[in-house]
Image: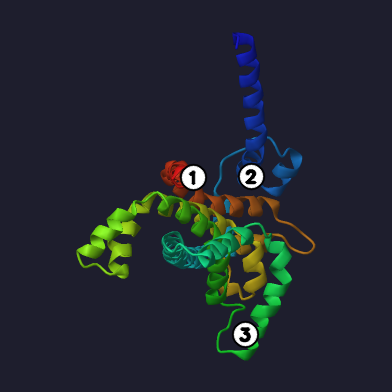
Amino acid sequence: MNKMKRLIIEVLALLLGIVYLLPVYIMIVNAFKDRAQMYDNVLALPDKFDFVFFKRAIEKMDYIKAFSNSLLIAVLSIGFIIILASMTAWMLVRTKHIISKIIFFTFIATMLIPFQAVMMPLMQFMGFISKNTIFQMLNTRFGLIYMYIGFGTSMAVFLFHGFIKGIPISLEEAATIDGCNKWKIFWNIIFPILKPTTVTVIILDLIWIWNDFLLPSLILSSKSLRTIPLSTFYFFGEFTIQWNMAMAGLVLTIIPVIIFYIFAQKHIIQGVTAGAVK
């Protein structure tokens, strides 16, 4: 490849990167403007970088409460997904039976079904459970966590399954000879080896759960239970939209995920690659 072709490709890649980053730029610069400045020129830099709109957004969103709700839901959901999916994948790999293959391919098949296809039947079923049992699945954190576990387990089983296939079974046989039962083998030998895939599952699920709007909007109706994405929607009224406040709220929403992603992003490729190769 000559220098001219390489230069053209680099320029095109740079332009494409600018196009992708433009919405982020618009969101950040308009978070510092009042409505008059924003409507005057949405692409211009603000007259001054004043954080007053961030302060108002934090008060109106009840940011601390929303942050606590999002954090609690994400931590519990991801914790249960990792425990259940890693155990399931291990047993599916080590049990050489047609039923194990059917169960695994069922998990894979559920990954192909879009949430919108099961949204209405799911809400009707959860409403039925809430009315006829002691488990309140609607307008509770428990119900939302339960559904996140269900939707997130398939991908986690797929990743763990690929990684566990590369772990020599001789490790488990040696542990059995030393007197370990299944429980000890999993927690003392298998689970520590799964660290790269575990980190990958944590990162991918945290980004998904933290930014999810649709499922919490269907489940949570009480203001005290709102997650951060639901609180941001507070600025989009029926007749008016507080765009500058909404921009400040969106910046506050993505900051925690960006910070987490910067510190943990290298583990994503490492974990996915390890699972795919093995």
Residue 232 appears at what percent x and percent y?
63, 59
> Is 18 left or right of 203, judged from the image as shown?
right
What residue is shown with label 2? Answer: 27
Q: Name the residue under label 3.
A: 130
Identified by mark 3, the residue type is Ser
**As drawn, which residue projects farthest toward the right?**
239
Of the image marks 2 and 1, the number of the one nearer the N terminus: 2
> Whole-percent x and y of residue 6?
60, 15
- Please tell me how crowded label 2 is: few (under 14), some (14-19), or many (20+) other residues with Cα within 10 Å: many
**Mark 1 element type:** helix
Q: State whether residue 46 appears in this view.
A: no
Mark closer to the chain start, 3 or 2? 2
Q: What element carries label 2?
A: helix
Res. 276 mark: 1
Q: Distance between the residues labelled 3 and 1?
A: 40 Å
Spot occupied by residue 264 in the image (x, y as percentages of width and height): 42, 46
Q: Which of 125 and 45 is in front in this view?
A: 125
In front of the other: label 2 or label 1? Answer: 1
Circle 3 or circle 2, nearest the eye? 3
Callout 3 secondary element: helix
Indicate the quadrant containing the N terminus: top left, top right, bottom left or bottom right: top right
Distance from the alpha carbon under mark 3 to that under mark 2: 40 Å
Residue 222 in which image quadrant? bottom right
Question: Label 2, label 1: how many angstroms apart (C-alpha)?
Answer: 36 Å
Earlier sequence position, callout 3 versus callout 1: 3
Name the residue type under label 1: Ala
In percent of the image, x 64 and y 75: which residue is there?
221
Closer to us: 6 or 239? 6
Q: Which colour scheme is used?
A: rainbow
Mark 1 and mark 2 in contact (Cβ < 8 Å)?
Answer: no
